[in-house]
Image (cartoon, grey):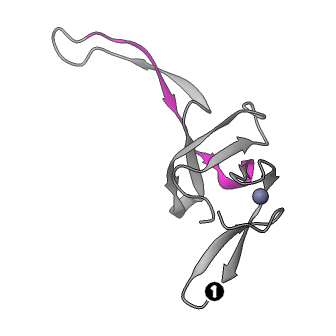
Amino acid sequence: MKLKKGDKVRVVKGKDSGKEGAVERVWPKNRRVTIAGVNLFKRHMKPRAEGQKGGIVDFVRPLPVSDVALVCPKCKQLTRVGYKITDHDKVRICRKCEQEI
Ligand SMILES: [Zn+2]
């Protein structure tokens, strides 16, 4: 997975296209990410227990990683993630400004 928790991303496809937010969780198995406040859906809750209220709650659905683009924290451009191999490590870099991110 090229994205990780806390990355700032912009949605480039779908109903929330253009929205930005931080990655809240990554789902490597199905290559999806959840982004805070993005791709909200309403869920109608029934009261389950005595004294508990039902109602409509917002919940966030994960988006395919292909629908979001990383906003580079260094150059602020929409970019793809690249990798650079250093002596000890593999580091993520921005493909636009080539800085480590
Ligand atoms: Zn950059």
Q: Which residues are magenta?
A: 53-69
Query: Where is 24 relative to 83, above or below?
Result: above
- For the image, the number of numbered tags is 1
Which residue, as the protein is rendered here, is positioned at the far left? 50
Q: x, y (%) of residue 45?
A: 38, 18
Toward the viewer: 1 or 48?
A: 1
Q: x, y (%) of residue 20?
A: 69, 36
What residue appears at the point 59 percent right and 66 percent down from the top-left corner? 1
Which residue, as the protein is rendered here, is positioned at the far right? 96
What residue appears at the point 67 percent right and 67 percent down from the top-left corner? 100
Q: Is residue 47 left or right of residue 44?
A: left
Disc 1 crowd, CA 10 A, few/some/many (<14, 14-19, 20+): few
Q: Secondary structure at mark 1?
A: loop
Quadrant of picture, ligand 1: bottom right
Q: x, y (%) of residue 39?
A: 62, 32
Label 1 is placed on what type of residue? Answer: Thr
Query: Where is 10 relative to 38, above or below?
Result: below
Query: Where is 98 relative to 75, above or below?
Result: below
Toward the viewer: 57 or 80?
A: 80
Q: Is residue 42 left or right of residue 17?
A: left
Question: In which image quadrant can residue 13 be found?
Answer: top right
What residue appears at the point 52 percent right and 33 percent down from the top-left corner? 60
Query: Where is 60 relative to 47, above or below?
Result: below
Inspect the magenta stretch and tell me whether residue 86 lies in it. Answer: no
Q: x, y (%) of residue 18?
A: 78, 34
